Amino acid sequence: MSVPSLSALHGVIDQAAQIVLGKRRETQMALTCLLARGHLLIEDLPGLGKTTLAQTLARLLGLDFTRVQFTSDLLPADILGLSIYERESGNFRFMPGPIFTQLLLADEINRATPKTQSALLEAMEERQVTSDGETRRLPQPFFVIATQNPAHQIGTFPLPESQLDRFLLRLSLGYPDAASERALLAKGDTRQHIAQLTPLLSPTELLAHQAACEQVFVAPALLDYVQSLLISSRATHFFHGLSPRAGLFLLAAARAWAYLDGRKAVLPDDIQALLPGVACHRLRARQSDTAASLEDIEDLLRRTPIP
């Protein structure tokens, strides 16, 4: 399969930056996550563009898109689907749920109960759904972009570690800078422009880009560096260190980051740029029993020599 030009991917970032103002780097991180075949968790206060970013990426990448609003009364069958008995035939017929799409937006995922949250585990890990003893494959490509509100907000259920570990990256958009916020106030709600966007890629082209990312070279010395970061995280002030799977995710994201930059090899800078997004939601500080902060990850990087 031939690899399409990188210009389309750069166009995705450029156009998304016109919708989600002042968040170009975060948009590039989100696209990197999808190129690395990963799922994305966006945590922030309401009204900062989480849903808008997900809708914009789905539109520009030409993906089928479904949004599910997670609430405390949402059931697993509302996401996965269920079997309906048909009296005429005397058989059960499976009715696919909204998860049978290419990009699922799990909006405010931490407002659903743990039972409903766990319904996504198999789909996110295996790209399949098992119901009534039958396994059904999900469309390709398949991504979950989940948004969640900060844990201190009313009516939230913290995601368990097993669920958090399914997300390759966690992002926080934060408030826009002054110039971007002023432009937004003058321009008005940018969400109305999403429907007017023209897809820049097809799902087949996106799959080709994903395959090309996997061919980006990682030198043995960089593999040693990633392993050193994993080992160092286990010997510091975190409750538990990073797992081997976190290391694999970090390498996949670094390959995609380098690929977007037009390079055929990963640099230490790529590892350092992506480690906070990969590690923060996987590590808990021993002193405060909260998710690791950016300062914690910077300290981890300082104590781990670069090869």
Image (spheres, rainbow, N blue to C red):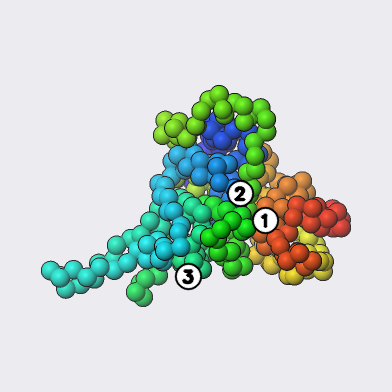
Which residue is the site of mark 2? 44
Q: Position of residue 279 (x, y in %)?
A: 70, 58
Q: Residue at x 59, y 26 (%)?
A: 183
Q: Amino acid at mark 2?
A: Asp
* Residue sitting nearer the eye, 3 or 297: 297
Q: Looking at the rendering, which quadrant does residue 158 occupy?
A: bottom right
Secondary structure of residue under mark 1: helix
Q: Residue furthest front?
A: 154
Q: Position of residue 250 (x, y in %)?
A: 68, 56
Q: Earlier in the sequence, mark 1 or mark 3?
A: 3
Q: Position of residue 73 (x, y in %)?
A: 42, 64
Q: Residue at x 83, y 55 (%)?
A: 299
Q: Amino acid at mark 1?
A: Val
Which residue is the site of mark 1? 278
Instruction: Compute the Cα span from label 3 to label 2.
Output: 23 Å
Instruction: Compute the Cα span from label 1 to label 3.
Output: 25 Å
Q: Looking at the rendering, which quadrant does residue 197 occupy?
A: top left
Neighbor class of circle 3 (other Cα within 10 Å; few <14, some 14-19, many 20+) is few
Is the residue under label 2 in contact with that under label 3 (CB below 8 Å)?
Answer: no
Neighbor class of circle 1 (other Cα within 10 Å; few <14, some 14-19, many 20+) is many
Which residue is the site of mark 3? 115
Secondary structure of residue under mark 3: helix
Q: Earlier in the sequence, mark 3 or mark 2?
A: 2
The image quadrant where one finds the C terminus is bottom right
* Residue sitting nearer the eye, 194 or 214: 194
Instruction: Compute the Cα span from label 2 to label 1.
Output: 17 Å
